[in-house]
Image: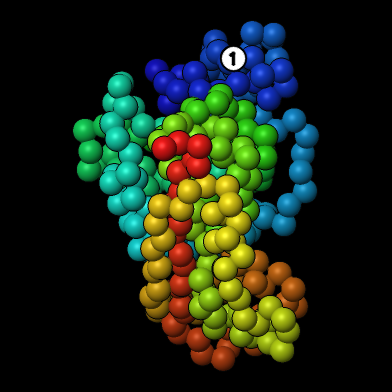
Amino acid sequence: MSQLDKIINIFKCPVCGSSIQSEEAKNISCLNKHSFDISKEGYVNLLLSPVKTQYDKKLFLSRSIICRSGFFKPITDCITDIIKEGINKTDNNSIKILDAGCGEGSHLAQIIENLNGKSDAEYFGVGVDISKEGIKMAAKNHSQNNVWCVADITKTPFINKGFNAVLNILTPSNYTEFDRIIADNGLLIKAIPGSNYLKELRNIFYNNTDKETYSNEKVLKYFSKHFDLCSTRNIEYQVELTRDNLEQLINMTPLSWGADDEEIQKTLTIGINKITVDMTVIVGKKNNIK
């Protein structure tokens, strides 16, 4: 039985909302015969119309390299601990976790690997992103215990209360949709930049602009309007970088999107050998659950 078959019951048709069945290896279909192909890499495209995005193959390749280097390990370790501490075993000992805006899948894959190595429960990861390039890479590299879908996080193809936890790491949120798909007593775990996140690059690319400094205060307040805030964890550390990894980091961060080639090359030659990671991990529960 495939990973998709094991959790097919949490999916719903993005066209009509009816339940979905997996009838053969090449596609899934709903009760009203809307059919969706399973790619050769193993992901499912449930996005009804293509969406243009700046997140391309080059960016995701760089992000994959950076993630494999351990750059985000303290963050994924923190999220692993939050899930272990905050999610109770389910009746069937199966815990389903969605990464909304998963990109190329490295964060979710690492967290699911961590969890399944430390628990009697079985953890399933579902990664969703509007970028086909990111999902294609995720399915190719991280198939074990994970299902990957091209889909819109503002209108996800999942049933109500289908997930024990939703992760939202360095990406925008849709709190109304998250509230719908998170189970009662489930968790929303959101990781956001702190004021010092990649400050060495921010100070260069946003020098003398209103973006040279950053505060996550508005994000925290908006989160608290939609979910009961259970805890916040601030994580700050420095990572030593080779020139190659610095180049990969520049390729993957939106901080560099407004920079021209000359500015990027100058940044690579000024001798940055350490970079600051500063993130806040926020944990919330549905505010209608007591």
Q: Position of residue 8 (x, y in %)?
A: 50, 20
Q: Is the residue marked by circle 1 packed among few (<14), some (14-19), or many (20+) residues within 10 Å?
A: some
Q: Position of residue 146 (x, y in %)?
A: 44, 35
User: Residue 240 appears in which quarter of the rendering?
Assistant: bottom left
Residue 198 visible in the displayed image: no
Q: Position of residue 16 (x, y in %)?
A: 71, 17
Residue at 54 percent across and 54 percent down: it is 224
Q: How many marks?
A: 1
Q: Position of residue 237 (x, y in %)?
A: 38, 75
Residue at 39 percent across and 69 percent down: it is 235
Residue 23 visible in the displayed image: yes
Q: Residue furthest front?
A: 290
- Direction from residue 245 to residue 46 in the image, left or right: right
User: Residue 241 appears in which quarter of the rendering?
Assistant: bottom left
- Quadrant placement of the C terminus: top left
Q: Is residue 47 above or below residue 255?
A: above
- Quadrant placement of the N terminus: top left
Residue at 57 percent across and 68 percent down: it is 217
Between residues 256 and 166, which one lies in front from this camera angle?
166
Residue at 63 percent across and 53 percent down: it is 172
Amino acid carrying label 1: it is Ser
Q: Is residue 269 above or below residue 96?
A: below
Q: Is residue 273 above or below residue 57?
A: below
Q: Is residue 76 above or below residue 51?
A: below
Q: Which residue is mark 1?
A: 19
Under circle 1, the secondary element is loop
Q: Residue furthest bottom?
A: 270
